[in-house]
Amino acid sequence: MPTREWLEHRNRLWLALRQEPPGSAEFERLLEELARLIHWDRPRILAALGLSEPDTAP
């Protein structure tokens, strides 16, 4: 079972990711960190955000 700290960190990453413009350097950094944390691939995270790869083109 995930710890409270892990869940809070995950939730902060999701929130921060939603606040960044897709394709920005910070968006990409947050996406990579979240992917490592939750073991999801990029397309799955983008889909959860309602985005696809073309939406993240700079």
Image (tube, grey):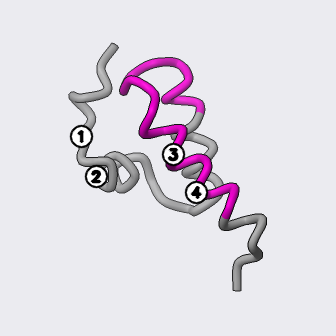
Q: Alpha-carbon neighbours of circle 4 within 10 Å: few (<14), some, or many (≥20)?
A: few
**Residue denoted by label 3:** 15
**Looking at the image, do the residues carrying marks 1 and 3 touch, with CB atoms under 8 Å apart?**
no
In the picture as drawn, the residue positioned furthest to the top comes out as 58
Query: In the rendered image, which quarter contains the C terminus?
Result: top left
Alpha carbon separation for disc pair 1 and 4: 21 Å
**Residue denoted by label 1:** 52
**Looking at the image, do the residues carrying marks 1 and 2 touch, with CB atoms under 8 Å apart?**
yes
Alpha carbon separation for disc pair 1 and 3: 18 Å
Circle 2: element type: helix
Alpha carbon separation for disc pair 1 and 2: 6 Å
- Indicate left or right for 34 with 49 as reference: right
Across and down, in percent, residue 4 comes to 75, 72
Is 21 within the magenta? yes
Alpha carbon separation for disc pair 3 and 2: 15 Å
Q: Residue at x 39, y 23 (%)?
A: 21
Q: Quadrant of residue 37?
A: bottom right
**Residue denoted by label 4:** 11
Alpha carbon separation for disc pair 2 and 4: 17 Å
Circle 1: element type: loop
In magenta, the rendered stretch is 8-29
**Looking at the image, do the residues carrying marks 3 and 4 touch, with CB atoms under 8 Å apart?**
yes
Q: Earlier in the sequence, mark 3 or mark 2?
A: 3
**Looking at the image, do the residues carrying marks 3 and 2 touch, with CB atoms under 8 Å apart?**
no
Identity, as a three-letter code, of the amino acid under mark 2: Ala
Q: Nearer the viewer, mark 2 or mark 4?
A: 4
Q: Alpha-carbon neighbours of circle 1 within 10 Å: few (<14), some, or many (≥20)?
A: some
Q: Earlier in the sequence, mark 1 or mark 4?
A: 4
Circle 4: element type: helix
Across and down, in percent, residue 15 comes to 51, 45
